[in-house]
Amino acid sequence: MTRTGTPHPSPAVSGRRTTTAALAAGLVLPALLSATACGGPAAADSTARDITVMTFAPAGTGAADRPGMTALAEAIGRDLNAHDGLGGRKVHILTCNEHDTTDGATACADQAVNAHAVAVVGSASQYGSNFIPVLEAAGIPFIGGYGLSTPEFSSPLSYPVNGGTPALVAGSGRQLIEAGCKQIALIRPDSRAGDALVSYLNTAVKQTGIKVTDIKAPEKSNDYSPYTRRAIGDDRPGNCVLSALGAEPTGNLLDPYRRANPKNTQLASVIGSFQQSVVDSTGGDNGPLRGALATGWFPAESSPVWDNLRATVRTYGNGTTIDVSDPGVQTTWVAYTVLRQAAGRVDPSRPLTAKALQTVLDSGDPIDTAGTTPPLGWGVTNMLPTADSPRLVNTSVTFQQVRNGRLTEQHPGFTDVRTILAG
């Protein structure tokens, strides 16, 4: 059974515990009372063996929304409890809307702490600097974040299942080398995070003679025509355009790209900036994404590795629209796969606690994710040898291409970009 909560934003980190407690009756309680009938972790139907897990993501905010992640978490909770829970333990899935704000992310983390969650799983927020310290202070593992913030790849209690945007851009560099690019125009956000992407792309293509043109663009705009024209340039063979702007900006970029109608330029992007639903909405094989290249964290949505995800959505989604091609949804699925495997390694006669899960995950013993990623481990030997992103253990990406209106594997298997990310 699942429960949902949408707490009001809490104050900043300083003084958080006192303020949250003081406002509990006026702020948090109404949100919990709006949840489904399962009630809180101390509800009458709970037992000492029941466990609580949280998933949070923004909803109702615009471009950052990932409602499919929390909807899938609830479906997984129904599936788990229909099949003996986690090792015989009933699971309460607590979901939270973090509203794409610092206060919202902090409030979700506070709610996880107050609910004595054993883990936060398959969640999305760009405010890791705000919510991760809350989870660290309570000893709650953060399993399978979407990878939007640096602390997700550095916190000792974070267990990322993908390589974030750095792995995607590094992988795209490799993919564009294979495509025969002579020069690459990178359209990326005009931000500090965007600055880092240029470095990863340059590292990926160094010693190849490929010229990288850095095109800084606003993170939000209704007209990307000037940036598109500059990226396409003289539209000669060997010209490649790589968009790393994110979903909504890339969608806005596709219209001027279609109008420009380049004949020789190869378009490429990263999963998350576009996905199958965008291919469909822009005309499929007759749209601007025809033949486009894409670098992803996971196999293409058409891969049989997602059959169980599709079955779970059909059976336990309760009619909710969940886009199984969405990389956030796929990340949540992989994260819960990790949780299932880790929980299965805890002695069923002992409590399944946050510390018990941490011990399993820190062991470094590989966790099989049924082909959605290479085996994952977060032991010392798995760490990336960088000060900024040591927890970025999954350095593998997939190469995909739009063919006949479908995102399909350009070639099977994973490509490891660890050497690029390690510098």
Image: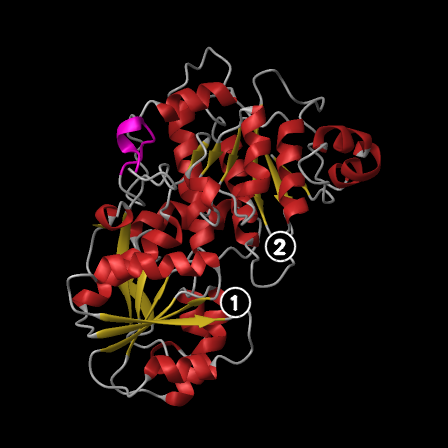
Q: Is residue 302 visible?
A: no
Front of the two marks 2 and 1: 1
| Residue 218 visible in the current orientation | yes
Residue 52 vs 231, above or below: the answer is: above
190 or 244, which lies in front?
A: 190
Q: Residue 78 got which mark? A: none
Give residue 260's position: percent from left, percent from top.
Answer: 38, 88
Q: Which residue is mark 2?
A: 59
Q: Say which residue appears at 67% left-offset and 23% top-offset.
A: 45
Total marks shown come to 2
SS at circle 1: loop
Is residue 144 located in the magenta-colored stretch of the structure?
Answer: no
Q: Earlier in the sequence, mark 2 or mark 1?
A: 2
How far from the left and from the top, in percent, is residue 392? 35, 41
Left or right side of 95 for 293: left
Residue 285 placement: quadrant: bottom left
- Which element is circle 2 on? loop
x and y percentages locating residue 324 in the rendered image: 44, 55
Q: Of helix, strand and loop, which mostly describes the magenta segment? A: loop
Q: Which residue is mark 1?
A: 219
Q: Mark 2 and mark 1: span between their CA atoms? A: 19 Å
Amino acid identity at mark 2? Ala
Which residue of the protein is positioned furthest toward the right in this rendering? 26
Q: Nearer the viewer, residue 34 or 144?
A: 144
On the image, the x and y values in percent for residue 275 come to: 41, 64
Rendered image quadrant of residue 375: top left
Q: Which amino acid does the dot numbered 1 rest on?
A: Glu
Report the magenta residues as a range.
375-384
Which residue lies at the image location 41% right of the left edge and 14% below the top edge? 347
